[in-house]
Image: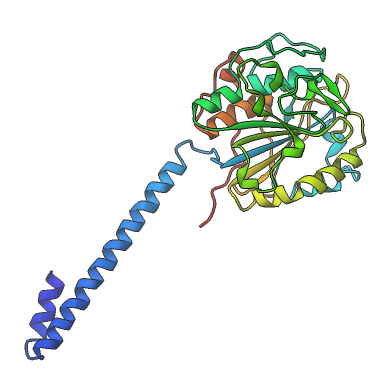
Amino acid sequence: MKAIKDQFKNNRDRPFSAMVLMVIVLFMSSIVLAGKDSASRKRAARFIRDNDTPGLAHPDHIIFLWLENRDFDGIIHNGEAPYINSLIKEGTLFTNFYAITHPSYPNYIDFFAGDPNGVTDDGCIDIPKFATPNLYTKLKEAGKSFAWYSEDLPATGSKVCIYANYVAKHNPVPIFTNVPDSVNKRFEEFPTDYSRLENVVCISPNKVNDMHSGSVQRADSWIKTHLAPLVLWCNTHNSIFVIEFDEGENNGNNRIPVIAVGESVKRAYKLKKMYDHFSWTKTVSAMFSAPDAWTDNLNSAAIISGCWQKKVE
């Protein structure tokens, strides 16, 4: 108002119509400035919400590709895995990440349920027997979705232990009574429209394409052929793609290669903090505001931090 009065004082001798026009211009300018202030407040509010958990990304989707039985040094800088190694400069390499145990099955169950539920070997479990909390049930509590896609799974929800090159020991969801069959999906059902993916997704190639019974080179080629477009999509759609190994080779120290790529992941970054499968379980839950400490293992696990970056508008 003071600005308007000053303008009137300095323009008393001007025609009335010019004075009216000046009033209109000043009025419209005040509306524009108010709108800018409102937009600034909205941006600040969004920034606060986006950072409600300091140092943690909040993706729309996170996808885990599960591979088999390789030590860190067996993959990183291995010339037989050119595509996997190309992702190191695109995202974050975990240099101090460990599997929980040997063999495969308990590692997958550890990740999915935060506890092995007494499973210590790869023996067939063809009847659902566990009703303990898991990533599906906890994410559901938060209104989020989960699915596990397995190559060569004969049918959605199948409980079979072995079919073609599919093995159930690389897929923990069928053995839980509180997980519906619809969560246990065939890789052939993987959507081409990635926006239709569940919030949290796991992918298990068959045992020939996941390095269990096939070569590193074959698995690397399979990943590039089937998932390279998904990796690119994650970089521009607030999503994260993770290469995860169930365990190291034989009975070594179980240090495994893990690489994360995505819009909220630091590029060409090496994360030296020590983490394990429980760390991912807890981190994924926290990312989607779900309960993240429903077992003693998860309660003591560290949330993964240091490798996340905020999108620059």
Can you give x and y, in whole percent of width and height, for residue 10 in the image? 11, 84
Residue 199 image-quadrant placement: top right
Q: Is residue 189 left or right of residue 3?
A: right
Residue 113 or residue 166, whichever sits in front: 166
Image color mode: rainbow
Residue 77 or residue 63, whichever sits in front: 63
The residue at the point 31 percent across, 57 percent down is 38
Numbered disc total = 0
Can residue 303 be seen here? The reply is: no
The residue at the point 57 percent across, 32 percent down is 145
Q: Is residue 108 left or right of residue 198?
A: right
The residue at the point 64 percent across, 15 percent down is 177
Q: Height in image: 121 above or below 220?
A: above
Residue 241 or residue 136, whichever sits in front: 136
Residue 255 image-quadrant placement: top right
Which residue in the rendered view is the most extreme toward the front?
155
Can you give x and y, in whole percent of width and height, for residue 56 in the image? 54, 38
Can you give x and y, in whole percent of width and height, for residue 281 in the image? 62, 26
Can you give x and y, in whole percent of width and height, for residue 116 in the image? 69, 14
Residue 265 image-quadrant placement: top right
Q: Height in image: 38 above or below 131?
A: below
Can residue 171 be seen here? The reply is: yes
Residue 220 or residue 192, whichever sits in front: 192
Q: Is residue 90 left or right of residue 282?
A: right
The residue at the point 10 percent across, 75 percent down is 5
Q: Quadrant of the N terminus?
A: bottom left
